[in-house]
Image (cartoon, helix red, strand yellow):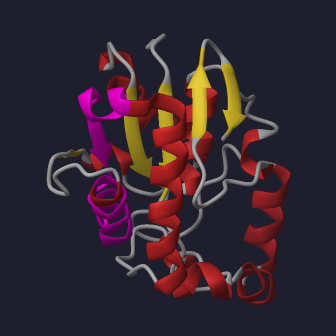
Amino acid sequence: MSRAPLYFVRHGETDWNAEGRLQGQRDTPLNHRGHAQAGEAAERLRGLLGADVGALPFIASPLERTRHTMEGLRRALGLDPAGYTLDPRLREIGFGAWEGLTWKDVRRSDPARSQARDRDRWGYCPPGEGAESYAMVAERVRPLLEALDRPTVVVAHGGVARAVMVALGAANTEDAPHLEILQGRILVLEAGTRRWV
């Protein structure tokens, strides 16, 4: 597994984030605050890495909210906005039939499955096409992480961050699904540790 530092950026806020809706693999755009958070993340990254930041590889999920966060971040760093790679393994966890709903909606409309998920946040797979568990996402991203051989900037999603932390030994399967994944900040993952900048 990669031992080089990973600089993980969650995409900026969308209206669905603000409303507490499960986005999953739906393509939702950044809102005004989300665009500003891309610039905030860029300043934090510049503070961490200085002029060296431009030499790193940048990889993003192919969803619109991550692409626009990456492009805004790179623009704020004075880098070519298009100078990054897309990797479909970084797309968000699929929530299947629950996408577009709030957790309150899910608990009301599907109480038995909601309770089953509460008992096993890491391993539970929601109903519907394209649905995944965090365990499945961790297996999806593991080959990408294993291929990283130098410090890398990744822009992806909250569910992916949880899977990446477990895959890199920076969180366990019990805690990871409950961790808050911040927007506009940098999650530094290195040598089995995690810290927010």
Residue at the location (72% across, 89% down)? Answer: 105
Horizontal side of 154 relative to 168 (left or right) equals: left
Q: Quadrant of residue 53?
A: top left
Expressed as whole percent of the image width and height from the top left, the position of residue 110 reads 73, 81
Query: Residue 177 versus residue 196: which sits nearer the camera?
Result: 196
Q: Is residue 16 visible?
A: yes
116 above or below 151? below
Horizontal side of 180 relative to 186 (left or right) equals: right
Q: Is residue 137 visible?
A: no
Expressed as whole percent of the image width and height from the top left, the position of residue 128 reads 47, 71
69 above or below 91? below
120 above or below 58? below
Which region of the structure is painted magenta? 51-74
Where the N terminus falls, by quadrant? top left
The total of numbered circles placed on residues is: 0
Expressed as whole percent of the image width and height from the top left, the position of residue 187 reads 60, 40
Horizontal side of 155 relative to 84 (left or right) equals: right
Where the C terminus falls, by quadrant? top right
Query: Residue 150 versus residue 112: which sits nearer the camera?
Result: 150
Expressed as whole percent of the image width and height from the top left, the position of residue 85 reads 19, 44
150 above or below 7? above
Residue at the location (37% across, 62% down)? Answer: 66
Q: What predominant SS class does the magenta segment belong to?
A: helix
Residue at the location (45% across, 63% down)? Answer: 38
